[in-house]
């Protein structure tokens, strides 16, 4: 019986790695914070108001930009969007409902849904109150975005420059300056770099060990934040990496027969988070006008996974889609045999992205007590 179980595990692992080799980066993106129906507008200090929310990053904050570029890294099909809007409305968000971009916009009192910048149906008011430039499958490492044929952080910054020109045409230079300087910016990316590019790219593994690779990631993050500051951003939140080794897909790949958390990936993410946090502190001293806020997601998400019942959940080691062990992106589709009906009991929607319900809890744990630091 033990030999049979071992053989089944090896077969499953081989199949999963084979799928990854043919569809690189298909299931692995980053994390953050959000929900659809229960977000509460937070009280801002000194009666501050926020004119716009601007978001950069990967699939956890991509509200549909990948729908409009030539990439396989999309989720504009069912069962994605199962609980979005009126139900069964796939929008390009990698979850059953809304995602961090939306809830952050709602918490700052800007709007309930943050649209993707590439949506051709955008109205002037949509632009004025903010958009997401994020692209699922991207990362700090330029190779990550190139491999997935998605928008790199450089591409996203170029789109932001274009965005500034558009809103200046609508409201003029002075109002644009206010929107840009008073807006809230969120950066959320990096998980694809470690979970995909480093894990499966011989190019990177041959040249870098984990300490060196996380140095590369940190350098890219620093360059991005300096450029963003140069373009006028002053209130910037940077979301760290989650406990990657404990998400369902990584348990399947590296967790052995029992699908335990992968210590090596968790160690890598903690190392990067330490370096990222230190760089944010350094940049805060360099740019005294800026409010740079590090947002820790690693510890809150890990606590939820280790003790799901405490946070109102039942299932923490697999997703809601299919077996929950490897399905994500195009591997989670309308032909997938089983989609759970009780998403509120699951921390994960697919094998890598949390449910809308889990994002709601994370939002309170990660963001609420940090709001004041943006002002």
Image (cartoon, helix red, strand yellow):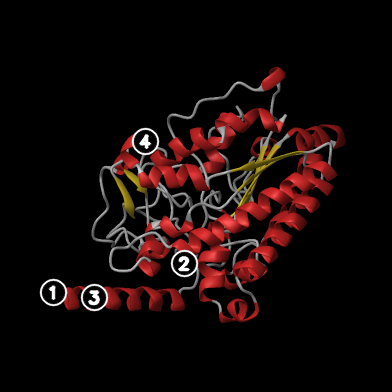
The mark that comes first in sequence, 1 or 4, is: 1
Residue 26: give its label.
2
* Few, some or many residues within 10 Å of mark 3 (<14, 14–19, 20+): few
Number of the front mark, 2 or 4: 4
Horizontal and vertical percent for residue 260?
35, 60
- What is the number of the mark on residue 182? none
Q: Quadrant of the C terminus?
A: top right
Residue occupying the far left of the picture: 1
The answer to which of 63 and 322 lies nearer the viewer is 322
Residue displayed at 37% across by 41% down: 83
Left/right of residue 51 with respect to residue 73 in the rendered view: right
Q: CA distance from mark 2 to mark 4?
A: 29 Å
Q: Which residue is mark 4?
A: 311
In the displayed structure, 88 sits above or below 321; it is above
Who's the residue at 42% across and 61% down the image? 329
The quarter of the picture where residue 221 lies is: bottom right
Secondary structure beneath label 4: helix
Q: Are marks 1 and 2 in contact (CB under 8 Å)?
A: no
Marked residue nearer the N-terminal end (2 or 4): 2
- Please name the residue shown 44% across and 47% down the image: 302
Mark carried by residue 1: 1
10 Å crowding of disc 2: few (<14), some (14-19), many (20+): many
Which corner quadrant of the image does residue 150 belong to?
Answer: bottom right
In the rendered image, which residue does mark 3 sit on?
6
Question: Which one is nearer the viewer's eye here, 126 or 137?
Answer: 137
| Residue 244 in view here | yes
Disc on the earlier residue, 2 or 3: 3
């Amino acid at each position: 019986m033990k030999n049979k179980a071992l053989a089944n595990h090896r077969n499953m692992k081989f199949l999963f790695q084979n799928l990854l080799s043919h569809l690189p980066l298909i299931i692995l993106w980053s994390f953050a914070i959000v929900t659809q129906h229960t977000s509460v507008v937070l009280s801002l200090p000194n009666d501050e108001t926020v004119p716009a929310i601007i978001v950069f990053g990967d699939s956890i904050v991509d509200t549909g930009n990948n729908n409009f570029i030539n990439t396989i890294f999309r989720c504009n099909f069912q069962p994605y969007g199962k609980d979005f809007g009126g139900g069964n409305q796939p929008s390009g968000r990698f979850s059953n409902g809304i995602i961090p971009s939306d809830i952050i916009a709602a918490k700052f009192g800007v709007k309930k849904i943050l649209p993707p910048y590439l949506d051709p149906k955008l109205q002037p008011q949509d632009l004025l109150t903010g958009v997401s430039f994020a692209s699922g499958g991207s990362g700090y490492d330029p190779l990550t975005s190139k491999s997935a044929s998605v928008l790199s952080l450089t591409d996203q910054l170029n789109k932001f420059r274009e965005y500034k020109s558009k809103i200046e045409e609508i409201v003029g230079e002075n109002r644009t300056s206010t929107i840009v300087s008073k807006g809230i910016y969120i950066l959320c990316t990096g998980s694809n770099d470690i979970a995909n590019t480093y894990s499966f790219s011989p190019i990177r593994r041959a040249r870098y060990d984990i300490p060196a690779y996380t140095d590369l990631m940190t350098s890219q993050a620093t360059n991005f934040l300096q450029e963003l500051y140069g373009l006028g951003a002053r209130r910037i939140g940077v979301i760290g990496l989650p406990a990657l080794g404990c998400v369902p897909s990584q348990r399947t790949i590296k967790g052995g027969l029992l699908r335990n958390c992968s210590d090596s990936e968790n160690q890598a993410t903690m190392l990067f988070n330490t370096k990222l946090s230190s760089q944010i502190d350094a940049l805060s001293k360099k740019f005294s006008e800026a409010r740079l806020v590090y947002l820790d997601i690693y510890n809150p998400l890990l606590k939820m996974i280790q003790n799901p019942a405490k946070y109102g959940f039942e299932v923490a080691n697999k997703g809601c889609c299919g077996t929950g062990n490897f399905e994500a992106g195009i591997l989670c589709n309308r032909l997938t045999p089983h989609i759970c009906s009780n998403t509120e009991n699951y921390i994960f929607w697919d094998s890598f992205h949390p449910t809308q319900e889990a994002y709601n809890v994370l939002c309170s744990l990660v963001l609420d007590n940090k709001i004041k630091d943006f002002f």
